[in-house]
């Protein structure tokens, strides 16, 4: 049984296995507890015994009682972990769909569409930023990094478990939100500080090197940009997203 469980856990390093099983790995005390708190069901906990004996959180201990638990030593924990230093706890969790809220005229909602963001760290950071600014939900274009891989989960710092995320073509979310303003982040748009965001809207952020696709640009109501004063060619996608979302919330 232990060999089988370890094999399943290790297989979840690969996207195709996550998709086939509907399961994903969460590593480290903070993120495992965040996943439990957000209502994700854990199939198996892999634990270091000395760490477990120090736990006193009733909610977490109850979750342990309703899941399979295995004690692991350093070598086995290293085998299933993708971190540089193996953590004291790893969980195999079941994925669940969290629907993205539709437009509500009583709220100045903000949504995010990420077009082929390739770096999983950027994606996870964008989810953390979206969580900070109260984004209603995040859509990702086909070709975007998988939000459920280890690097993205770590970079999101648990925000992935709170912010609804769904993959779709750009036309789907435009139709879903209907008359919501659509803003495209480009290098040649209107200065973001001069845009009136009082009605909220959908923000489109593009690929780190190529920007937004022509398909995405065809849907936008306005192109917006962050003025630069130095000689850098562009901003990191996550930094740009944070700056624009800050202006949208003002």
Image: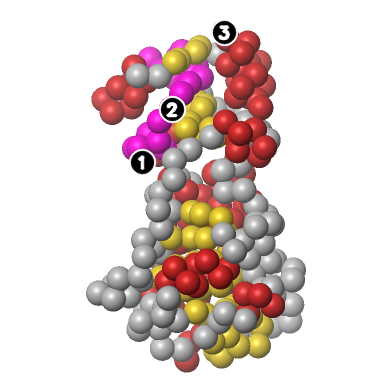
Check residue 135 in the rendering and tell me which mark sits there, or answer none: none
The residue depicted at 50 percent of the width and 12 percent of the height is: 71
**Where is residue 111 shown, x and y percent of the image?**
44, 68
Give, as a single range, the part of the protein colored magenta: 35-54
Q: Would you call the spot at circle 1 few (<14 residues within 10 Å), some (14-19), or many (20 or more)?
A: some
The residue depicted at 44 percent of the width and 68 percent of the height is: 176
Q: Nearer the viewer, residue 141 or 135?
A: 141
Find numbered disc 1 in the image and state the secondary structure of the residue it sits on.
Answer: loop
Determine whether 167 is above or below 185 in the image.
above
Answer with left or right where residue 168 lies relative to residue 231.
Answer: left
Q: Nearer the viewer, residue 94 or 210?
A: 94
Could you give the CA–CA distance between mark 2 and mark 3, rounded to whole angstroms?
17 Å
State yes or no: residue 47 in magenta. yes
The residue depicted at 44 percent of the width and 19 percent of the height is: 51
Task: Tell me if I can see residue 2 in this picture.
Answer: yes
Q: Would you call the spot at circle 2 few (<14 residues within 10 Å), some (14-19), or many (20 or more)?
A: many
Q: Are marks 1 and 3 in contact (CB under 8 Å)?
A: no
In this figure, which residue is indicated by the disc labeled 3?
Answer: 1
Q: Would you call the spot at circle 3 few (<14 residues within 10 Å), some (14-19), or many (20 or more)?
A: few
**Where is residue 89 shown, x and y percent of the image?**
49, 25
Determine whether 157 is above or below 102 in the image.
above
Could you give the CA–CA distance between mark 1 and mark 3, rounded to whole angstroms?
28 Å
Find numbered disc 2 in the image and state the secondary structure of the residue it sits on.
Answer: strand
Dot placed on the residue nearer the N-terminal end, 1 or 3: 3
Task: Tell me if I can see residue 117 in this picture.
Answer: no
Answer with left or right where residue 108 lies relative to residue 70.
Answer: left
Check residue 38 in the rendering and tell me which mark sits there, or answer none: 1
Q: Nearer the viewer, mark 1 or mark 3?
A: 3
Tell me which colouring the rendered structure shows.
secondary structure
In this figure, which residue is indicated by the disc labeled 2?
Answer: 42
């Amino acid at each position: 049984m232990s060999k089988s469980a370890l094999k399943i856990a290790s297989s979840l390093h690969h996207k195709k296995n996550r998709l086939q099983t509907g399961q994903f790995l969460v590593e480290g005390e903070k993120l495992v507890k965040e996943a439990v708190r957000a209502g994700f069901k854990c199939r198996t906990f892999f634990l270091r015994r000395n760490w477990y004996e120090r736990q006193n959180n009733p909610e977490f201990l109850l979750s342990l009682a309703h899941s399979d638990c295995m004690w692991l030593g350093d070598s086995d924990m290293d085998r299933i972990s993708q971190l540089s230093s193996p953590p004291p706890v790893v969980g195999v969790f079941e994925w669940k769909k969290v629907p993205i809220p539709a437009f509500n005229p009583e709220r100045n909602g903000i949504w995010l569409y990420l077009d082929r963001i390739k770096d999983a760290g950027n994606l996870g950071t964008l989810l953390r930023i979206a969580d900070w600014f109260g984004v209603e939900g995040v859509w990702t274009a086909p070709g975007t990094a998988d939000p459920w891989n280890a690097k993205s989960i770590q970079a999101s710092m648990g925000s992935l478990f709170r912010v609804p995320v769904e993959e779709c073509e750009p036309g789907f979310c435009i139709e879903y939100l209907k008359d919501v303003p659509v803003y495209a982040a480009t290098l040649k748009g209107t200065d973001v500080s001069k845009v009136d965001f009082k009605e909220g809207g959908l923000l489109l952020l593009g690929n780190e090197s190529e920007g937004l696709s022509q398909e995405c640009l065809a849907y936008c109501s306005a192109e917006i940009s962050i003025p630069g004063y130095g000689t850098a060619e562009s901003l990191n996608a996550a930094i740009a997203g944070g700056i624009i979302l800050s202006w949208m919330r003002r």
